[in-house]
Amino acid sequence: MIFVFDLDGTICFEGAPLDKQIVNALHTIQAQGHEIIFASARPIRDMLPVLPVSLHDCRMIGSNGAFTYVDGLIEVEFLQANIQKQIIELVETYELAYLADSDWDYAYTGSVNHPMYKGIDSEGKATQRAIHELSGFSKVLLFDPPTNVTQHVKKWQVTTFEYTEEKILDICSPNLNKVKGLERLGVKEYIAFGNDVNDRLMFEQALHSVCVGTHLVGEVATERVTQEDVHLKIIELGEEWHQ
Protein backbone atom coordinates (compact mmCIF):
# COMPACT_ATOMS: atom_id res chain seq x y z
CA MET A 1 0.00 0.00 0.00
CA ILE A 2 1.06 3.60 -0.55
CA PHE A 3 1.06 5.90 2.48
CA VAL A 4 1.00 9.65 1.74
CA PHE A 5 2.14 12.04 4.45
CA ASP A 6 1.82 15.78 4.73
CA LEU A 7 4.70 17.27 6.70
CA ASP A 8 4.02 20.38 8.81
CA GLY A 9 1.52 19.76 11.58
CA THR A 10 1.21 16.10 10.57
CA ILE A 11 4.57 14.42 11.15
CA CYS A 12 6.79 17.53 11.34
CA PHE A 13 6.16 19.96 14.20
CA GLU A 14 7.26 23.58 14.69
CA GLY A 15 9.53 23.27 11.67
CA ALA A 16 11.82 20.76 13.40
CA PRO A 17 13.06 17.59 11.64
CA LEU A 18 11.00 14.44 12.12
CA ASP A 19 11.48 12.98 15.58
CA LYS A 20 12.80 9.47 16.20
CA GLN A 21 9.40 7.97 16.94
CA ILE A 22 8.01 9.17 13.63
CA VAL A 23 11.10 8.08 11.70
CA ASN A 24 11.04 4.64 13.31
CA ALA A 25 7.34 4.26 12.47
CA LEU A 26 8.00 5.19 8.83
CA HIS A 27 10.89 2.73 8.62
CA THR A 28 8.61 0.08 10.12
CA ILE A 29 5.97 0.39 7.41
CA GLN A 30 8.64 0.54 4.72
CA ALA A 31 10.01 -2.77 6.01
CA GLN A 32 6.49 -4.20 5.62
CA GLY A 33 6.60 -3.34 1.92
CA HIS A 34 4.56 -0.14 1.99
CA GLU A 35 5.68 2.84 -0.09
CA ILE A 36 5.93 6.31 1.50
CA ILE A 37 5.21 9.51 -0.41
CA PHE A 38 5.57 12.94 1.18
CA ALA A 39 3.13 15.64 0.02
CA SER A 40 3.71 19.11 1.44
CA ALA A 41 3.00 22.80 0.91
CA ARG A 42 6.78 23.25 1.11
CA PRO A 43 8.87 23.19 -2.06
CA ILE A 44 11.19 20.20 -2.41
CA ARG A 45 14.12 22.42 -1.34
CA ASP A 46 12.54 22.86 2.09
CA MET A 47 11.15 19.33 2.43
CA LEU A 48 14.49 17.54 2.25
CA PRO A 49 16.12 19.19 5.32
CA VAL A 50 13.41 17.98 7.74
CA LEU A 51 13.58 14.40 6.46
CA PRO A 52 16.34 11.96 7.42
CA VAL A 53 18.65 10.97 4.56
CA SER A 54 17.24 7.44 4.82
CA LEU A 55 13.92 8.78 3.45
CA HIS A 56 15.32 10.99 0.67
CA ASP A 57 14.69 8.21 -1.85
CA CYS A 58 10.94 8.51 -1.31
CA ARG A 59 8.84 10.14 -4.00
CA MET A 60 7.61 13.60 -3.04
CA ILE A 61 5.04 16.23 -3.96
CA GLY A 62 5.88 19.82 -3.11
CA SER A 63 4.09 23.17 -3.06
CA ASN A 64 0.67 21.48 -2.93
CA GLY A 65 1.21 19.71 -6.24
CA ALA A 66 3.42 22.15 -8.16
CA PHE A 67 6.51 19.97 -7.64
CA THR A 68 7.18 16.28 -8.07
CA TYR A 69 10.40 14.64 -6.94
CA VAL A 70 11.37 11.21 -8.26
CA ASP A 71 14.82 9.59 -8.16
CA GLY A 72 16.39 12.91 -7.18
CA LEU A 73 14.86 14.81 -10.12
CA ILE A 74 12.53 17.78 -9.61
CA GLU A 75 9.77 18.69 -12.04
CA VAL A 76 7.80 21.88 -11.51
CA GLU A 77 4.67 23.51 -12.89
CA PHE A 78 5.11 27.29 -12.95
CA LEU A 79 2.29 29.78 -12.75
CA GLN A 80 1.31 31.16 -16.15
CA ALA A 81 3.45 34.09 -17.31
CA ASN A 82 0.55 36.57 -17.25
CA ILE A 83 -0.32 35.57 -13.68
CA GLN A 84 3.31 35.94 -12.62
CA LYS A 85 3.30 39.45 -14.08
CA GLN A 86 0.08 40.36 -12.23
CA ILE A 87 1.49 39.04 -8.95
CA ILE A 88 4.64 41.13 -9.33
CA GLU A 89 2.54 44.23 -10.02
CA LEU A 90 0.29 43.44 -7.04
CA VAL A 91 3.08 42.98 -4.48
CA GLU A 92 4.83 46.12 -5.70
CA THR A 93 1.66 48.25 -5.71
CA TYR A 94 0.55 47.20 -2.23
CA GLU A 95 4.08 46.65 -0.85
CA LEU A 96 3.09 43.17 0.27
CA ALA A 97 5.31 40.76 2.17
CA TYR A 98 5.65 37.52 0.24
CA LEU A 99 7.53 34.33 -0.50
CA ALA A 100 7.83 33.28 -4.16
CA ASP A 101 9.34 29.87 -4.94
CA SER A 102 11.05 29.04 -8.21
CA ASP A 103 12.26 25.52 -9.01
CA TRP A 104 15.02 25.99 -6.40
CA ASP A 105 15.74 29.69 -5.71
CA TYR A 106 13.27 32.03 -4.05
CA ALA A 107 12.26 35.64 -3.34
CA TYR A 108 11.28 36.68 0.18
CA THR A 109 10.30 40.07 1.63
CA GLY A 110 8.69 38.97 4.88
CA SER A 111 10.07 39.40 8.37
CA VAL A 112 13.08 37.35 9.42
CA ASN A 113 11.15 36.84 12.67
CA HIS A 114 8.25 35.10 10.91
CA PRO A 115 7.95 31.46 12.06
CA MET A 116 8.13 30.30 8.44
CA TYR A 117 11.44 32.06 7.75
CA LYS A 118 13.64 29.52 9.53
CA GLY A 119 12.30 26.80 7.25
CA ILE A 120 13.24 28.59 4.03
CA ASP A 121 16.44 27.19 2.52
CA SER A 122 17.64 26.10 5.97
CA GLU A 123 20.69 24.42 4.44
CA GLY A 124 21.71 27.49 2.43
CA LYS A 125 21.73 25.68 -0.91
CA ALA A 126 19.54 28.16 -2.81
CA THR A 127 19.89 31.84 -3.73
CA GLN A 128 17.54 34.56 -2.54
CA ARG A 129 16.70 36.79 -5.50
CA ALA A 130 14.37 39.64 -6.37
CA ILE A 131 11.06 38.26 -7.60
CA HIS A 132 11.59 39.53 -11.16
CA GLU A 133 14.97 37.75 -11.26
CA LEU A 134 13.45 34.30 -10.77
CA SER A 135 13.28 32.07 -13.84
CA GLY A 136 9.63 31.61 -12.98
CA PHE A 137 7.71 30.79 -9.83
CA SER A 138 5.44 27.93 -8.93
CA LYS A 139 3.60 29.61 -6.10
CA VAL A 140 3.50 32.73 -3.97
CA LEU A 141 2.58 33.15 -0.33
CA LEU A 142 1.21 36.56 0.62
CA PHE A 143 1.60 37.40 4.29
CA ASP A 144 -1.38 39.13 5.90
CA PRO A 145 -2.78 40.58 2.64
CA PRO A 146 -5.62 43.13 2.86
CA THR A 147 -9.10 41.74 2.21
CA ASN A 148 -9.41 43.59 -1.09
CA VAL A 149 -6.20 41.96 -2.34
CA THR A 150 -7.42 38.50 -1.38
CA GLN A 151 -10.75 39.10 -3.11
CA HIS A 152 -8.96 40.40 -6.21
CA VAL A 153 -6.65 37.38 -6.44
CA LYS A 154 -9.56 34.97 -6.13
CA LYS A 155 -10.93 36.35 -9.41
CA TRP A 156 -7.83 35.14 -11.26
CA GLN A 157 -7.45 31.73 -12.89
CA VAL A 158 -5.46 30.34 -9.96
CA THR A 159 -5.85 27.99 -7.02
CA THR A 160 -5.75 29.63 -3.60
CA PHE A 161 -5.47 28.24 -0.08
CA GLU A 162 -6.16 30.50 2.90
CA TYR A 163 -4.37 29.68 6.13
CA THR A 164 -6.45 31.83 8.43
CA GLU A 165 -4.50 31.24 11.63
CA GLU A 166 -1.21 32.20 9.96
CA LYS A 167 -2.86 34.99 7.87
CA ILE A 168 -1.32 33.60 4.67
CA LEU A 169 -2.79 33.45 1.16
CA ASP A 170 -1.21 30.68 -0.94
CA ILE A 171 -1.42 31.18 -4.73
CA CYS A 172 -0.61 28.45 -7.27
CA SER A 173 -1.68 27.25 -10.72
CA PRO A 174 -5.37 26.55 -11.42
CA ASN A 175 -6.67 23.11 -10.43
CA LEU A 176 -3.41 22.36 -8.66
CA ASN A 177 -3.51 20.27 -5.49
CA LYS A 178 -1.86 17.29 -3.85
CA VAL A 179 -4.21 14.84 -5.59
CA LYS A 180 -3.10 16.18 -8.98
CA GLY A 181 0.47 15.61 -7.85
CA LEU A 182 -0.37 12.03 -6.93
CA GLU A 183 -2.00 11.54 -10.32
CA ARG A 184 1.20 12.72 -12.03
CA LEU A 185 3.00 10.02 -10.08
CA GLY A 186 0.43 7.45 -11.22
CA VAL A 187 -0.96 6.99 -7.71
CA LYS A 188 -4.67 6.23 -7.38
CA GLU A 189 -5.06 4.24 -4.16
CA TYR A 190 -3.43 5.38 -0.95
CA ILE A 191 -3.75 6.06 2.76
CA ALA A 192 -3.38 9.74 3.66
CA PHE A 193 -2.16 11.57 6.75
CA GLY A 194 -2.69 15.35 6.91
CA ASN A 195 -3.86 18.20 9.11
CA ASP A 196 -5.01 21.22 7.11
CA VAL A 197 -7.23 22.60 4.36
CA ASN A 198 -4.79 21.65 1.60
CA ASP A 199 -5.26 17.99 2.56
CA ARG A 200 -9.02 17.97 2.03
CA LEU A 201 -9.12 16.50 -1.49
CA MET A 202 -6.51 13.94 -0.51
CA PHE A 203 -8.66 12.89 2.45
CA GLU A 204 -11.79 12.65 0.30
CA GLN A 205 -10.16 10.37 -2.26
CA ALA A 206 -8.03 8.20 0.05
CA LEU A 207 -8.88 4.62 0.95
CA HIS A 208 -8.34 5.65 4.56
CA SER A 209 -7.45 9.10 5.92
CA VAL A 210 -6.08 10.37 9.21
CA CYS A 211 -6.33 13.97 10.38
CA VAL A 212 -3.70 14.94 12.93
CA GLY A 213 -5.11 17.52 15.33
CA THR A 214 -8.38 19.42 15.52
CA HIS A 215 -8.68 21.28 12.20
CA LEU A 216 -12.18 21.29 10.66
CA VAL A 217 -10.84 19.41 7.63
CA GLY A 218 -10.90 16.37 9.91
CA GLU A 219 -14.64 16.18 9.28
CA VAL A 220 -13.92 14.52 5.92
CA ALA A 221 -11.19 12.22 7.28
CA THR A 222 -11.76 8.63 8.35
CA GLU A 223 -10.39 9.35 11.82
CA ARG A 224 -8.46 11.80 13.95
CA VAL A 225 -5.38 11.34 16.11
CA THR A 226 -3.35 13.61 18.34
CA GLN A 227 0.18 14.72 17.53
CA GLU A 228 1.44 12.49 20.34
CA ASP A 229 -0.20 9.37 18.89
CA VAL A 230 0.51 9.77 15.18
CA HIS A 231 3.51 7.40 15.25
CA LEU A 232 1.34 4.71 16.83
CA LYS A 233 -1.35 5.18 14.19
CA ILE A 234 1.24 4.82 11.41
CA ILE A 235 2.35 1.49 12.84
CA GLU A 236 -1.24 0.37 13.43
CA LEU A 237 -2.32 1.09 9.85
CA GLY A 238 0.88 -0.38 8.48
CA GLU A 239 -0.01 -3.68 10.14
CA GLU A 240 -3.68 -3.44 9.17
CA TRP A 241 -2.94 -2.89 5.47
CA HIS A 242 0.01 -5.28 5.33
CA GLN A 243 -0.58 -8.18 2.94
Image (cartoon, rainbow, N blue to C red):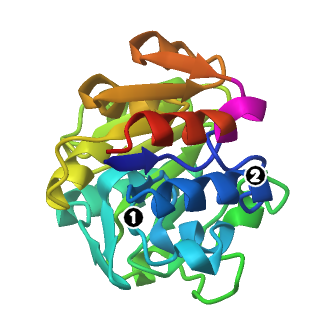
Q: Is residue 230 visible?
A: yes
Residue at 47% x, 52% y is: 40
Query: Any mark on residue 29, and which?
Result: none
| Residue 13 in the image: above or below residue 136 | above
Residue range corresponding to the magenta coloring: 226-231
As drawn, 21 above or below 146: below
Secondary structure found at label 2: helix
Q: Earlier in the sequence, mark 1 or mark 2?
A: 2
Q: Is residue 227 magenta?
A: yes
- Judge by depth and name the residue closer to the eye, 29 or 116: 29
Q: Amino acid at mark 2?
A: Gln
Secondary element at tag 1:
strand
Q: Which residue is mark 2?
A: 21
Residue at the image point whose x is 47% and y is 65% from the top: 43
Query: Looking at the picture, how far across and down is residue 202, in whole percent?
Result: 32, 34
Q: Which residue is mark 1?
A: 60
Inspect the magenta stretch and tell me whether residue 237 lies in it.
Answer: no
Question: Where residue 65 sits: x, y (%)?
Answer: 31, 54
